[in-house]
Amino acid sequence: MVSAGVMVSAQRPLRPLTWFVAALIVVVQGVASSEPLFVDVGESSGLIVRHDNGMQGQFWLLEVIGAGGGLLDYDDDGRLDVWLVQSNGADQLYRNVSRRSRLVFKRVDESVLSEPADGYGVGVAVADVDNDNDMDVFLANYGRNQLYVNDKGRFRRKESGLELDDDWSVAGSFADFDGDGLLDLYVVNYVDWSVETHKVCHDMAGRPDYCAPEVFPASADRLYRNLGEGRFEDISDRVGLSSSARPGLGVVARDFNGDGRPDFFVANDADDNQLWLNQNGRTLMDDALLSGVAVNGDGEAEASMGVSVSDFDRDCDLDLFMTHLAAETNTLYRSSSEGWFSDATNQFGLGVASTPFTGFGTHWIDADNDGDLDVYTVNGAVSRLQEQILAGVAFPLEQTNQLWINEGSRFTVTTDEHSAVGRGLSIGDIDNDGNVDMLVTNNSGEPRLLQNNTDGTNHWIGFRLDAPGALIMGATVSLTSRQCVTSIAQTDGSYASASDHRVLFGLGDDDGRQNLRVQWADGMIEAYDSLKPDRYHVLRYGGGAKRSEGDSL
């Protein structure tokens, strides 16, 4: 280790972006819109808190990472509430008390959150960890992580075995790794940094700046086995994680190889990504290199931040989209029927326009309910931007976000007019109108609540799964009237954030009744037929018509 005060050359130099910006203008000019697709109602709805990263002018790496947020229905009233992660201070939970179309949020008091979540917060993960049908909250912190157990709308902090003092955790993903009916937890850790080991880095002009992660030793991720009653056991050594330390920032749990068990894909910053295949609930094996997702199509490891997974091309297999550092592209890994992934970024027009930006939060969304999956990216720099330094911006890392519209063979991009140090992205239908809305969290800034402003001409259908948590996370919902129209119930992905686990499908101009099948996380398959569109349906475990395991979804 180099002691504090030693000069270290910058690992992420400022790059000239003139030609990148010119290319972006060309792309954006090809997209016309009379009204914005999303409208920011954060302030008007009551979300007026500002994130505080505690910066003191020392350029601590910790300052540029957070913070995430979460969408969850904590009180089971059918409306999504908002959890906002705070770094220098206590997290804040806002209850959704909306009536009709106007969104209104009220901050809860100690009667709901009796013990303040006052760690240095980075990320949040949400799931029903004790199978009581209440959504619980895991907080990924710098320092001691925290678990808040929900008991009928009241949270209590639980000493669970997830609390470790020496990790810098960023994100978590819940999945039943060992198939015992309880949700286990994969926690992504970043690097071994502290105030004592802080180093001084500089940009290409010799100005002090934030260091790159390569300057510090990487930390190993952890896997915790759920023992029941809110208690967890660290099994990282047993499954093979402890010997593979990389600077992780994002994670998703999905069954990537079709064996019925959840695997974990980890997005690493300036290092090879990892695809941990579940070996019968006993160990993990990294298959990223052989599967084609460790590095991009040029064979280079990228600075990966956020990750989202879906079958965007409707060919019945899972694809990955990842956000990266400026001067790199965001990357689309398209899966083949043989289980291999290929870098299809430029093929679908997702490369050039993303290069000026550093992407963090991201999600596949059907923004206009036309049945095609679009993608949204939240952007914010990690090295100070010269023009903002000269303009006197207090935290000169501000960038604008991007919406990528799926046009079939390519994506076209529009850029938000609002600039901030974007980090987290959570998605869900916050006003229950059948259109996906978004919560964007900003480092050292106010959150944005982006309400979907589409005209409602396209139809939709949504589902809430009613079952213990271990049966919901990873459950697959498929519309049988359409080829490969499938969604997986999960709250993970993006960056340091948690999303609504309800499933929502855009139907375009199809206003007919829909047939669907659900494969629950334990493998049971049920059919639910002749369901009306333009409304939400409750799918109860055991309430559908049974199908055999060999019955294709």
Image: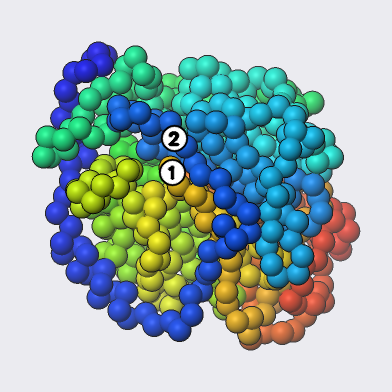
Q: Establish if 144 lies above or below 86.
A: above
Residue displayed at 22% across by 46% down: 389
Image spot of residue 540 (x, y percent): 85, 56
Q: Is residue 414 left or right of residue 231?
A: left
Quadrant in which the C terminus appears = bottom right
> Which amino acid type is marked by label 1?
Asn
Quarter of the image for residue 303 reads top left
Which label's residue is closer to the chain start, 2 or 1? 2
Residue 53 marker: 2
Point out the residue furthest to the left here.
Answer: 205
Image spot of residue 346 (x, y percent): 30, 65
Residue displayed at 68% across by 75% down: 460
Quadrant in which the N terminus appears = top left
Q: Establish if 85 lies above or below 370.
A: above
Q: Nearer the viewer, residue 326 or 475?
A: 326
Q: Is residue 85 left or right of residue 52?
A: right
Image spot of residue 486 (x, y percent): 63, 64
Q: Nearer the viewer, residue 441 or 266?
A: 441
> Which amino acid type is marked by label 2?
Asn
Image spot of residue 446 (x, y percent): 49, 49
Q: Secondary structure at mark 1?
A: loop
Question: Which residue lies under the disc numbered 1?
Answer: 443
Residue displayed at 46% across by 29% down: 189
Q: Nearer the viewer, residue 55 or 18?
A: 55
Q: Establish if 30 lies above or below 87.
A: below
